[in-house]
Amino acid sequence: MTTEWGFGEDLTGDSSIPTWRDASAAYEQYVNSLALKYNDSPVNVQYVVSRHPEDLDQFDALRLMCDKARIKELQLDRKSSDSDE
């Protein structure tokens, strides 16, 4: 289970994972579009989407992409700080 989230797995060479900034922007844009679609607040989107399975898969996929992008960024930061020493 932990390798699915990138723990214990080196994600730095995976070019399919975008930068944290790009992933975060895509996620935010999708959340905002869902908020408009369901006429609700972006804060409530996760709850709203749980009741609409037609949007749940993409929501979960974008959230996972963001998690992996953040982990990749942290791993790259760690590698660069290790090489500076």
Image (cartoon, rainbow, N blue to C red):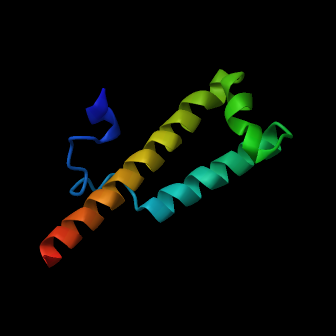
Q: Where is residue 12 in the image (x, y as percent from the top left)?
A: 24, 57
14 with respect to 65 (left or right): left
Outermost residue on the bottom side: it is 84
| Residue in the picture at 80% in, 40% down | 37
Q: In this view, does 9 lie above or below 74?
A: above
Quarter of the image for the N terminus: give it.
top left
Number of marks in the rendered image: 0
Q: Is residue 57 above or below residue 41?
A: above
Q: In this view, does 19 lie above or below 3?
A: below
13 with respect to 18 (left or right): left
Of the pair 13 and 10, the residue shown nearer to us: 10
| Residue in the picture at 64% in, 25% down | 54
Outermost residue on the front side: it is 85
Quarter of the image for the C terminus: give it.
bottom left
Q: Where is residue 21 in the image (x, y as percent from the top left)?
A: 49, 64
73 with respect to 25 (left or right): left
Q: Where is residue 61 in the image (x, y as percent from the top left)?
A: 49, 37
Outermost residue on the right side: it is 39
| Residue in the picture at 74% in, 30% down | 48
| Residue in the picture at 86% in, 40% down | 39
Quadrant in the picture for residue 80: bottom left
Q: In this view, does 27 lie above or below 74?
A: above
